[in-house]
Amino acid sequence: MRRQFLILVLVAVSHGLFAQAPESLVVFQPQIRFSIPTPLGWVRDSTSAKEMGLISAYHPVDTKWTNAPVVLYVNLSFKSDSNQTLDAVMKMDANKFVKMSQGVEVKEVETLHTFLQNKPIRIMSYRGGENDNYEHVAYIDEGLHVIIMVIGTRNEENLINSLPAFHRLTTSYFEMKEGCCAIRP
């Protein structure tokens, strides 16, 4: 009981460090449970997320989703089966990007870790191409699910300037397991 209380306090404190307000995304479904606080200076836009078929969408405070120079979003992907690897999911995404935008530069740029649970976050970069997109896509492997977090913009400067918010979003991810919470070493 003391351990669960301590874990809940740690979650609350970490979300307080990353959030702009009490605004946090909480996904609580039978197969997957997680939370992500809204980064400072950003607004969670549930209406736009719903319209786009996303779990959550974010844009800078003084903008709207439709005119923001940069956006963040969270989505969930289901693996085809228990044998599908995260590498296979990432390769499938990369192939889609290349087909949709000839000339796009694709590479894995870094691996971060979640703040409390130390889960690896693999990040791919998609730059340029005929659609002139600049995106970083973060992948967190959760067994049969992959949590996908994206920052997207139309120019490299906006991408670079907004990477701190993207890193706060990704590293603040917290998986809530059966029986509440789990912290990994």
Image: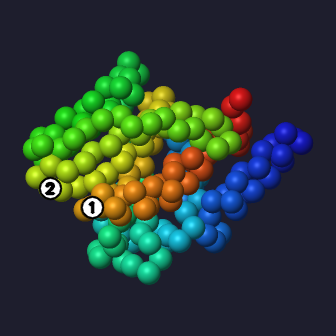
Closest to the observer: 10 or 178? 10
Q: Residue furthest front?
A: 157
Q: Is residue 61 above or below residue 2?
A: below
Q: Residues within 10 Å of mark 1 (few under 14, many from 20)?
A: some
Q: Is residue 7 above or below residue 145?
A: below
Which residue lies under the disc numbered 1? 155
User: Which residue shows up at 30% across the image and 57% down it?
Assistant: 156
Residue 29 falls left or right of residue 161: right
Q: Is residue 169 visible?
A: no
Q: Position of residue 5 (x, y in %)?
A: 84, 47
User: Which residue shows up at 51% across the image and 56% down it?
Assistant: 164
Sequence order check: which comes first, mark 1 or mark 2?
A: 2
SS at mark 1 in the image: loop
Q: Is residue 185 visible?
A: yes
Q: Position of residue 78 (x, y in %)?
A: 37, 36
SS at mark 2 in the image: loop
Q: Position of residue 21 (x, y in %)?
A: 63, 71
Tell me whether the residue at label 1 lies in contact with that at label 2, contact meaning CB atoms closer than 8 angstroms. no
Which residue lies under the disc numbered 2? 131
Which colour scheme appears in the figure? Answer: rainbow
Amino acid found under the numbered disc labelled 2: Asn
